Amino acid sequence: MRVIFMGTPEFSVPVLEALVTAGHDIAAVYCQPPRPAGRGKKLRPTPVHARADELGLLVRHPEKLSAPEDQEDFAALNADVAVVVAYGLLLPQPVLDAPKQGCLNIHASLLPRWRGAAPIHRAIMAGDADTGICIMQMEAGLDIGPVLLCEKTAIGAEETTSQLHDRLSTLGAANILTALERLSELTPIPQPSEGVTYANKIDKAEARITWSDPATEVDRKIRGLSPFPGAFIEHDGQRIKLLASRLVTGDGEAGTVLDDALTIACGSGAVQLTRLQRAGKSAQTASEFLRGLPLAKGARFGS
C-alpha cells in the first residue's frame, strides 16, 4: 500500500522499519520538528526523522497541520492510508479524510483505558495486570475512534516502562502489518463508553518518592517512571534516581535500610532497589551503588 507514516519518538521507529521491510511504499514521513538538545542546544532531529533519513525517505516536519497549504501537500501524496504512532499532534479533519482508507493509529493501551499521552507509564503506576496494543481508525478527538485490532499482554511483576515500551513497540509493528493486510475484512468496533481513563502527561513533580507510602505504590512509581523522568529521592544533599525495584517482605520505620541488599521499609511492606543512578553518574546495580555509597542496616535512606 502507499502509506504516509506519522511518528516521532523511538517507540515509532520499529513500526516504520516494519512497514519498509514489508514492502509498503512510504510516500512521506511526518514527525515533530528538530528541537534544541544537549549542552550546545543544537537542533537535533527526532528518532523517526533520523531513521527516515537513513532509509532515504521523504521527511516533513510542520509545526502544525492546520495551514491549508500543509493540508494540500498532505492530500497531494495520494496515499492509501496513514499510519500514526506517537506523532504528537491531533490531526485536523482534512488530514484524517485525505488518505483513501483513512488514518490508523497504533495506541499502547487496551482502549478505552488510558487514552492520551502516557499510557505505558500510567498502566504500570496504576498496577494494571495487563495492557496491550490497539489499532484504531482515527476520528477527530483524543483516541476515540473504533478499534480494528487489539492484542493483550501481561505486565511483568518487575517490568519497567522502558522494558514494556520496547515490547509494545514490537507488538505494534506486528499488528499494523496484520491490519494493513486484512484492512478490507476488519470490522471497526466502537469503543465502549464505560471504562474510559486518561493517561495524563507525566509531571516531574510526581517523581519524588515518599517512603511512608505503601510499598506497592512505591514500587509501581519506581518502575512506571523508569527511565524518564525517573523516580527520585534526596540523600545527603544529592538527588538519586531509583530505576528498578521489586516488592519484598519486610517491616520497619519508613525509609529505613533493612539489610545489606538495599531493602527499604515503606509505610507498609518494603521494596528492594535493584537499579539506581546518582547525579552525574551512570545507572548502577544495587551492589555497584553500595560500593560507592555504603548504607548499613538501620540507616535512613533519603526522603
Image (tube, rainbow, N blue to C red):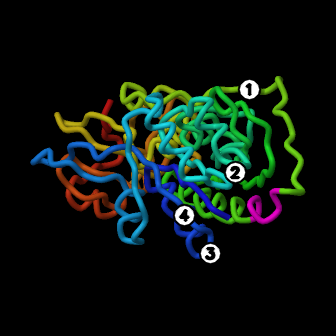
Q: Nearer the viewer, residue 273 or 155?
A: 155
Sequence-first disc among 4 and 2? 4
Marked residue nearer the N-terminal end (1 or 4): 4
- What crowding class fits label 1: few (fewer than 14 Cα within 10 Å), some (14-19), or many (20 or more)? few
Highlighted range, magenta:
178-183
Q: Earlier in the sequence, mark 2 or mark 3?
A: 3
Residue name at image x 59 percent, y 69 percent: 18
Q: Residue tagged by mark 3?
A: 23
Task: Verify whether residue 180 appears in magenta.
Answer: yes
The residue singled out by tag 1 in the image is 196
Quick check: marks 2 and 3 in contact, CB under 8 Å?
no
Give the residue number, with chain letter if any, for mark 2: 133
Q: Secondary structure at mark 3?
A: loop
Hey, what amino acid is under mark 1? Val
The nearer-to-camera label among 2 and 3 is 3
Mark 2 lies on a secondary structure that is strand
User: Judging from the image, what secondary structure is the residue with disc 1 in?
Assistant: loop
Sort mark 3 into few (<14), some (14-19) or many (20+) by Cα contacts within 10 Å. Answer: few
Q: CA distance from mark 4 to mark 2?
A: 22 Å
Q: Is residue 159 visible?
A: no
In screen coordinates, is 299 left or right of 113?
left
Looking at the rendered structure, the kind of residue marked 2 is Ile
Amino acid beneath label 4? Ile
In the picture, the disc for residue 26 is 4
The relative height of residue 228 versus residue 191 in the rendered view (above or below) is: below
Work out whether 138 lies above or below 169. Answer: above
Q: Which of the numbered marks, if any, corresponds to residue 226?
A: none
The CA span between labels 3 and 4 is: 9 Å
Question: What crowding class fits label 4: few (fewer than 14 Cα within 10 Å), some (14-19), or many (20 or more)?
Answer: many
